[in-house]
Image (cartoon, rainbow, N blue to C red):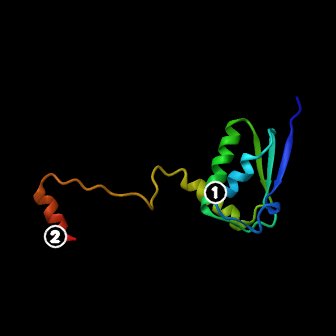
Amino acid sequence: MKNLSTTIMLSEYYAEAVSNRESVRLIFDKLPNVDFITIDFSDIVFISRAAAHELTLYLEKFQNRGKSISLANVSQNVNQMIETVAQSKKVDYKKSTFVERIIFKTDEELESYLFSV
């Protein structure tokens, strides 16, 4: 059986930016069944955080299936966003959505707290 490969030139689909999750889904959902995939970022200067997150999800999904995926010609800005997203996925909670929980044992404690804010 042959090891098939393909290269996806993002600039054929997007003008300088990949700005949402659906943009990434459209590319990956139409990939042929190959063993080696290269995603070429030539002329792409921006990727949104949402698109970068979706990209990392697909990279993990394909790598878990034993596919080899490489990113080529990635600009510094795009690489920085992908790295930022990859690092944030390692955190157990999201800082922007973390809510500290306060427990009150009595109604008086609750009332005292509410008057203090």
Q: Is residue 8 visible?
A: yes
Residue at point 70% right, 35% down?
A: 65
Label 1, secondary structure: give it. helix
Residue linked to disc 2: 115
Q: Which residue is mark 1?
A: 21
Would residue 92 appear left or right of 107 to someone viewing this image?
A: right
Do the CB atoms of the residues marked 1 and 2 lie less than 8 Å apart?
no
Question: Where is 107 relative to 75, above or below?
Answer: above
Q: At numbered mark 2, what does the secondary structure look like: helix, strand or loop?
A: helix
Position in image of residue 91 (x %, y %)? 50, 52
Answer whether residue 83 is visible to the viewer in this image: no
Position of residue 50 in the picture relative to residue 16 (left or right) = left
Closer to the camera: disc 1 or disc 2?
Answer: 1
Q: Is 41 displayed left or right of 109 in the figure?
A: right
Residues under labels 1 and 2: Cα distance? 44 Å
Three-letter amino acid code at the position of disc 2: Phe
Q: Residue at x 69, y 55 (%)?
A: 24
The part of the image, by quadrant, that contains residue 80 is bottom right
Q: Position of residue 35 (x, y in %)?
A: 80, 38
Q: Quadrant of residue 13?
A: bottom right
Residue at 45%, 52% (x, y): give it: 93
Measured from the top left, where is residue 49 in percent x and y? 60, 62
| Residue ranking furthest to the right | 2
Query: Which amino acid type corresponds to the residue marked 1 in the rendered image?
Result: Arg
Residue 31 place in picture, x, y as percent: 78, 45
Residue in the picture at 69% in, 61% down: 79
